[in-house]
Image (cartoon, helix red, strand yellow):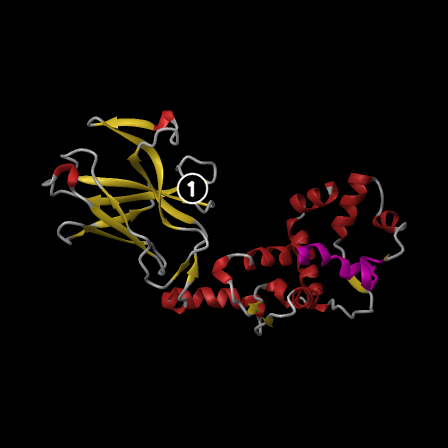
Amino acid sequence: METMEVFREEDKLEYLSLCREFEMKKRDIRPDSKAKCTIRVPVCLIERLQDVKGMSLKEVSSSNKSIVWVGDKLRLDAETAKSFFTEASRQIIDHISGIFEESAVVGTEAIVMVGDFSESPMLQEAIKTAFPNMTVIIPNEAGVAVLKGAVQFGFNPQVISPRIGRFTYGVSTNKRFRPHTDPEDKKQIVNGIMYCRKRFGKHVERGQSIEQGEVSEQQTYNPLTADQNRIILPIYVSLSIDPQYVDEEDCTYLGDLEVDMSDIQGGCEREVVVGMRFGGPDIAVEAIVKATGEIVNARFNCLR
């Protein structure tokens, strides 16, 4: 590992060349392969090994009968080459299995494999074996499928309809203090009323299916003071499904939601219903004064 670290830092072009060599080989190695796999090794890596370990590559590999050193090339027997895919395939299968346990994907009948690694016959066979009841779809040029999809989405965001929320989205808000539930250090008294600061007001739950243009679960907010002319709601995302406070470890500040409330008639009784509209490249915000139905100017500010 020490030799590879030095090689990666000091000989970047040769390191990338070696990576490309493996990139090509992973498409050639198949479950039924019998032939040896030949990999060209950059000369500078051989020199780095000599400098760091004081041994030649041939000396290092001499005890392993499945690896043969020939000139500037390593020749691996078929089983050794195939073993390189075992751990990566296992982790991918475990990840997919975890996704299938989520309620949002119940009833899924097909797996679409995209990305460079999806072109590997070894990974394809591992996926098909692990999920025999699934239809496994591998498009032509799977390696550039993600790029093509990104370009299409850039021109037409409506090309992707339902999405699965990667995070739980919500706002930092003050809610009535709950004795014996909320921590004392979050207690705040405003106009004689006890509030809990930094409560997570959830709008979208992680794993929730969101249709194109759908407005998230709406929440109602009030100003804390009678002369307050705007509400600033800090937006947070969380990896937790049901976060309680925005200062929890897995919560991340995203930006501010600013709601204009310049009409101060009604004081603290003014109510604004806020929802987030997902689906496009941005998060659009919809804010409506509850009493009148008036649409309030609200914008999502990620620059702070």
Q: Nearer the viewer, residue 178 or 153?
A: 178
Measuring from the top left, give residue 227's x and y in whole percent: 13, 34
User: In the image, is residue 96 above or below residue 271?
Assistant: below
Q: Residue at x 74, y 49 (%)?
A: 44
Measuring from the top left, give residue 190's x and y in whole percent: 23, 28
**Residue 74 part of the magenta-drawn span:** yes
Q: Quadrant of the N terminus?
A: top right
Q: Residue at x 55, y 57 (%)?
A: 101
**Residue 13 part of the magenta-drawn span:** no
Measuring from the top left, give residue 113's x and y in whole percent: 58, 67
Q: Nearer the viewer, residue 259 or 73?
A: 259
- For disc 1, the marked residue is 243
Extent of the magenta region: 68-90
User: In the image, is residue 149 above or below residue 102?
Assistant: below
- Report the side of 182 relative to 223 (left or right): right
Q: Residue at x 77, y 58 (%)?
A: 83
Q: Quadrant of the C terminus?
A: top left
- Report the side of 304 relative to 130 (left or right): left
- Report the side of 304 relative to 53 (left or right): left
Quarter location, residue 74:
bottom right
Query: How many other residues sit within 10 Å of disc 1, few (<14), some (14-19) or many (≥20)?
Result: many
Q: Residue at x 19, y 40 (%)?
A: 230
Q: Residue furthest front?
A: 180
Q: Residue furthest bottom?
A: 140
Mark 1 residue type: Pro
User: In the image, is residue 38 above or below residue 167?
Assistant: below
- Report the side of 193 relative to 132 (left or right): left
Q: Circle 1 — which element?
A: loop
